[in-house]
Image (spheres, helix red, strand yellow):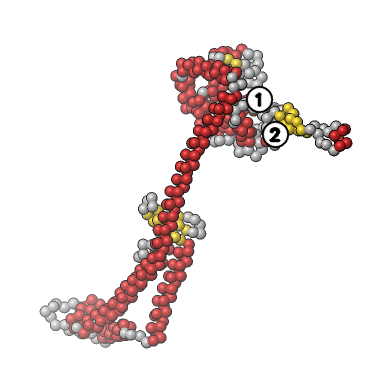
Amino acid sequence: AFLTCPDIRCGATFTTEPQYHSHMVESEVHAGQPPQFSHFHMMLRHQRGQDLLRSYLTRLHGITGPVAYLDAWFAIQEWKKLATTHETFESKAMNIIELYCTPDSARHLDMTFPGAERITTIHQAVKHREHKGLYRKTRATAGIIRNLIGIQGKDYFEFTTEGVLPPDVFHQLEWHCFMKVFTALESDVRFKRSNEYGTYAQLHVVDKAHRQEELVKDYERYRLMLIQQWTRGFCAEEKAMLDKANEIVDIYMKREIDLIYRTIEKQTVRERVREIRHAEQEKHEGTKLLTEDVVFWTEDSLLDEMYEHYTTALINKMLDMPELRKGLMQYSGHIKAQSRHMHVEIQPPSGKNKQEEWFTELMDNARKSEKGALPVNAQESVIIIQRRMRGVLGRKIGRKKFMTRYVKLFDSYSNCAYYQNNLTGESSWERPRMTKHLYHKSNW
């Protein structure tokens, strides 16, 4: 492609890079501009140079600052490749203005350069126009005779350029963005020492021959573009091509819609299967939890009863056997251990009958323990039952409250269960800690 000087004061066109660089040095228009101006322009024209430059600026400034101007410049270059009759020529230009030039745009640029008001005026005119193209329908002013008989003026189409997007709408903005990025890099001494610039320098040397070939191809494309402009009068052929393209688009659109419908159908089936599994599991969840609770407390009560009964009976039985009583007294330190072949002689110390006091206390405790294992009266039975029922009822209320907040779901992909909080919407693979106190050994 031809090389065009980006300076709005110049706009000269060249066929080779040496001609372009010589022009930047010798032309009076560019007097005072640094010699790196043309090299920076060539770097922007290189695809890899664009990528490396954006990578460097993004690393320093993010997506704001010079990067926004750089993206705006690239967008304008892509828009300039479109013909004025292209169907997206106007829409893409409006997108560039709304993205970079309006006060509420996402990546607002500095609009203090000359010609900024013209962009805003053109944007408002195109956005709020009521006609399409260069002709709009209007009504002529009624003459004297028409006014006398009460007839309105005749409708006709008048030629107008209001609301038409001119091809040079971004002429000033393009130069403004170019100089913003160039000034930011020219004042940054770290750029030429960066890895990005070193990579670009190597690519520039390697691709020199390739760029010569691309120049020939660009010239061929340019000639082809001129021929296409000369043959725009064949509207019927272009219309047939457009209709065929729309037909192909409709075919592929139908295929994509069918694919989306099938995807939605599969997703709906998976969701329905998950709901059915949850509903089937929920029917038996309460019975399972109640069974586990009954088994747990039955086991606990049986262990308590066995301990109370057999421990008391064991102590009483041990107290009836002299050898075991002797062993208990020896273990407590009230008598000294004797040989198995010797008779046991218990001689309390003079003046103190500690052994007898200990034995009496032991017997009293054994009797009290034995009485504790015996059946209680009606009032004590009611108190015990109420205490245990309050524990069961409290857990039941806690479980009911817990199950209104949490739901156990099954993931068919991982074949694992997970827990979801209906109040906050959070989900976790870990079992909530509260279940340890509410369900004990259950795997809920």
In the foreground, 29 or 254 = 254
- Neighbour tally class for label 1: few under 14, some 14-19, many 20 plus, Cα within 10 Å: few
Viewer-nearest residue: 319 or 436: 436
Report whether 369 appears left or right of 20.
left
Mark 1–mark 2 CB contact (< 8 Å): no
- Secondary structure category for the residue under label 1: loop
Regarding mark 2 in the picture, which secondary structure is present there?
loop
Q: Position of residue 139 (x, y in %)?
A: 78, 33
* Left or right of 251 in this view: 128: right
Q: What residue type is labelled 1?
A: Asp
Quadrant where the C terminus is found in the figure: bottom left
Q: Residue 432: percent from the left, percent from the top? A: 42, 60
Tell me how many marks there are.
Answer: 2
Quarter of the rendering containing residue 225: top right
Between 187 and 250, the one nearer to me in the picture: 250
Q: Residue at x 46, y 47 (%)?
A: 264
Of the pair 192 and 291, the residue shown nearer to us = 291
| Residue 367, quarter of the rendered image | bottom left
Tell whether 87 sits left or right of 360: right
Sequence-wise, the earlier of marks 1 and 2 is 2
- Which residue in the protein does label 2 denote? 131
Q: Quick one: which residue is furthest to the front in this view? A: 149
Residue holding disc 1: 168
Rendered residue at 61%/12% (across/down):
26
* 181 versus 399 height, above or below: above
| Mark pair 1, 2: CA separation | 21 Å
For the N terminus, give its image quadrant.
top right
Q: In this view, does 397 lie above or below 230?
A: below
**Residue type at tag 2:** His
Q: Is residue 139 above or below residue 269?
A: above
Residue 443 location (% of width, % of height)? 36, 62
